[in-house]
């Protein structure tokens, strides 16, 4: 009976270790999904009202509010010549900005400028 008891304890320990190892393999996949959820892409559309090249931001007047977006060299720009640099001449244009939240900042991942809007100067 002693040997049977010892075998059962060893078997239970192996099952426990196998379950712990399987759970540990799942752990690395879990933390990246939490920040990834916070970085889900969202979009906003409206009129491009301001471009701050020094601050690398644009302001878009949506139907409900003025929204500020940060951009960088990774931001994809379509519909404007010279990419991000071309936005400065596009004030008044209708744009759609895909962005992600990083803390309190809206980080533009892509900016689509629709034809028809022009600088109203």
Image: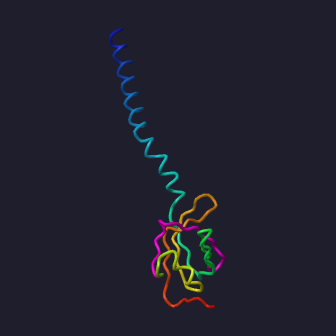
Residue 19: quarter of image: top left
**Residue 95 coordinates in the image, percent (x, y):** 53, 80
The residue at the point 51 percent across, 74 percent down is 84
- Whole-percent x and y of residue 64? 65, 78
| Image coords of residue 81 (percent x, y) | 46, 81
Based on the picture, tell me whether residue 67 belongs to the magenta stretch.
yes
- The one nearer the camera, 65 or 21, is 65
Magenta highlight on residue 77: yes
Residue at the spot x=66%, y=76% of the render?
A: 66
Q: Is residue 45 left or right of residue 30?
A: right
| Residue 3 sits in quarter | top left
- Span shown in magenta: 61-79
Residue 22 vertical position relative to residue 4 in the rendered view, above or below: below
Residue visible at 51% across and 80% down in the picture: 86
Q: Residue furthest right?
A: 65
Quadrant location of the C terminus in the rendered image: bottom right
Is 9 displayed left or right of 98 in the figure? left
Q: Looking at the picture, does residue 110 appear above or below residue 9?
A: below
**What color scheme is it?**
rainbow
Left or right of 25: which side holds 50?
right
Residue drawn at the location 39% of the way across and 33% of the way down: 21
Q: In front here: 38 or 79?
A: 79
Residue 59: in sight, yes or no?
yes
Q: Residue 68 appears at what percent x and percent y?
A: 63, 71
């Amino acid at each position: 009976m002693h040997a049977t008891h010892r075998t059962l304890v060893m078997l239970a320990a192996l099952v426990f270790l196998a379950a712990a190892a399987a759970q540990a393999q799942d752990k690395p996949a879990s933390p990246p999904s939490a920040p990834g959820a916070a970085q889900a892409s969202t979009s906003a559309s409206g009129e491009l009202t301001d471009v701050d090249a020094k601050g690398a931001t644009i302001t878009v007047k949506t139907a409900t509010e003025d929204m500020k977006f940060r951009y960088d060299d990774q931001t994809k720009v379509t519909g404007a010549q010279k990419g991000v640099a071309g936005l400065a001449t596009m004030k008044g244009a209708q744009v759609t900005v895909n962005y992600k939240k990083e803390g309190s900042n809206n980080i533009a991942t892509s900016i689509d400028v629709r034809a028809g809007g022009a600088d109203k100067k």
